[in-house]
Image (spheres, rainbow, N blue to C red):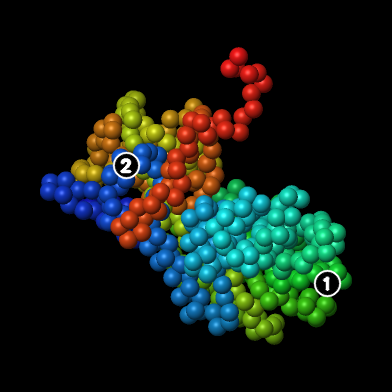
């Protein structure tokens, strides 16, 4: 194998779960995760198929925990972002790790409750929570992140009418600074739809004090999938300035400060090398410690929200190549999945890489475009990727598929959502079955009784 291809293969393998290996079988080879052949899993469960490797999740969590323990001397915590990917089994894993779980609305709360996650570790986000969302949050969550003054007033009215005890409240600050990422993933800029400006935050603090509401924290979030922590610095300064003024004006200090999450991950070999999670954690910790010292503030509990940086690398999607097409300038590998299970390339121009699950060390045959089966020209999963000669019936694996694929997926063109398999210590467990044709019409109510 040529040196360039060998290096590229090693880089691609490094993007797969920690337990991924190329195993030799005589003259051929196969790609395994947790000791299990991805080819065998694809044949057993069908495709498209998603697999999640528990050992990679554990390793990612350990990096965050160790980074916080080394860099931040005050209490700290970690919240798993349910929007990255959530199902009952993953919520159970979150509960087993003593993590908090961030839920957006009543739907994700229902999944968390089904998994038995304790109320004290359920945190509710949402930019425009409905009455049903607020009601579920009041009944099931330990903490609510309040997005706006209107929501705060509605919460107070609901609590007054029910005479129930309020969960702890955090206020979502709009810091006026976004991170460097795709415009659709930015959330902290001044004209963002998320959160409150500084003056609104002061009004919310005063409202909570006047009405005896348990205000415990400040939260902000600047965007998702960023790679440079520097813009977090000014946002932390803004939050600490607000806290300092609130302390002198109202005598209030937060127990917790949460600068959100959104740290990016490498998806493609061209993204390597990538700054590690530890650099992100260290930057926030050092900036917060220094900022509190300058303002003579006690260190708050630091709560981080790793979403994709915790779960993305743990996931792999597997597709079957149904057709190979050659147009004048492109070689098309047509897959049995695409934008219905992974809309990120169409939404954000996200770049991915891939490998065949068998005979991985074949020489490259030139660039390929990996397209899906859906009636959209934007249904291109991967563009211009060096690949071997691939034949119909082969299977391809796409790494870094654990976040914002299935949670953003759809039934476009009647697509049925894929099966999901949990890999742990050489054992495979089905944690979400594949949708059936019957599932597609389960909610439908016909206008006419066609049976007559």
Mark 1 lies on a secondary structure that is: loop
> In the drawing, does residue 128 fall left or right of residue 224?
right
**x, y percent for residue 108:** 60, 52
- Residue at 52% over, 41% down: 409
- Residue at 25% over, 40% down: 388
- Residue at 45% over, 55% down: 312
Q: Which residue is mark 1?
A: 212
**x, y percent for residue 47:** 37, 38
Is residue 366 shown to the viewer in this render? no
Q: Nearer the viewer, residue 364 or 67?
A: 67
Q: CA distance from mark 1 to mark 2?
A: 57 Å
Q: Residue furthest front?
A: 452
> From the viewer's perspective, is residue 300 above or below residue 33?
below
Mark 2 lies on a secondary structure that is: helix
Q: Which residue is mark 2?
A: 44
- Residue at 74% over, 55% down: 135
Disc with the residue nearer the chain's start (1 vs 2):
2
């Amino acid at each position: 194998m040529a040196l360039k291809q060998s290096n590229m293969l090693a880089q691609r393998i490094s993007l797969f779960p920690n337990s991924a290996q190329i195993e030799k079988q005589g003259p051929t080879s196969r790609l395994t995760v947790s000791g299990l052949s991805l080819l065998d899993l694809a044949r057993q469960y069908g495709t498209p198929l998603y697999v999640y490797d528990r050992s990679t999740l554990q390793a990612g969590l350990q990096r965050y925990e160790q980074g916080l323990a080394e860099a931040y001397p005050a209490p700290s915590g970690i919240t798993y972002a349910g929007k990255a990917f959530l199902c009952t089994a993953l919520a159970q894993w979150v509960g087993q790790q003593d993590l908090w779980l961030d839920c957006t609305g009543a739907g994700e709360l229902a999944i968390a409750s089904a998994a038995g996650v304790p109320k004290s570790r359920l945190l509710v986000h949402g930019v425009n929570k409905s009455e049903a969302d607020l009601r579920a949050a009041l009944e099931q969550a330990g903490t609510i992140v309040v997005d706006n003054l209107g929501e705060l007033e509605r919460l107070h009215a609901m609590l007054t009418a029910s005479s129930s005890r309020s969960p702890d409240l955090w206020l979502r600050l709009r810091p006026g600074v976004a991170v460097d990422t795709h415009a659709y993933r930015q959330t902290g800029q001044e004209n963002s739809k998320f959160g409150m400006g500084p003056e609104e935050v002061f009004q919310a603090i005063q409202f909570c004090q006047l009405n005896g509401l348990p205000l415990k924290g400040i939260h902000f979030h600047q965007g998702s999938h960023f790679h440079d922590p520097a813009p977090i610095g000014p946002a932390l300064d803004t939050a600490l300035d607000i806290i300092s003024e609130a302390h002198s004006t109202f005598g209030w200090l937060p127990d917790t400060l949460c600068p959100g999450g959104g740290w990016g991950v490498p998806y493609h070999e061209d993204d390597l090398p990538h700054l590690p999670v530890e650099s992100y954690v260290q930057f926030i910790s050092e900036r917060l410690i220094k900022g509190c010292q300058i303002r003579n503030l006690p260190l708050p509990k630091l709560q981080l929200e790793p979403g994709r940086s915790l779960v993305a690398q743990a996931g792999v999607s597997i597709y079957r190549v149904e057709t190979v097409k050659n147009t004048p300038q492109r070689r098309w590998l047509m897959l049995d999945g695409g934008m219905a299970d992974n809309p990120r390339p169409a939404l954000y121009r996200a770049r991915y890489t891939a490998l065949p699950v068998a005979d991985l060390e074949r020489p490259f045959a030139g660039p390929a475009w990996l397209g899906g089966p859906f009636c959209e020209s934007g249904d291109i999963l991967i563009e211009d990727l060096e690949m071997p000669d691939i034949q119909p019936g082969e299977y391809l694996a796409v790494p870094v598929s654990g976040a914002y694929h299935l949670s953003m997926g759809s039934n476009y063109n009647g697509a049925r959502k894929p099966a999901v398999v949990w890999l742990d210590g050489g054992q495979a467990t089905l944690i979400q079955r594949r949708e059936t044709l019957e599932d597609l019409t389960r909610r439908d109510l016909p206008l006419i009784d066609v049976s007559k």
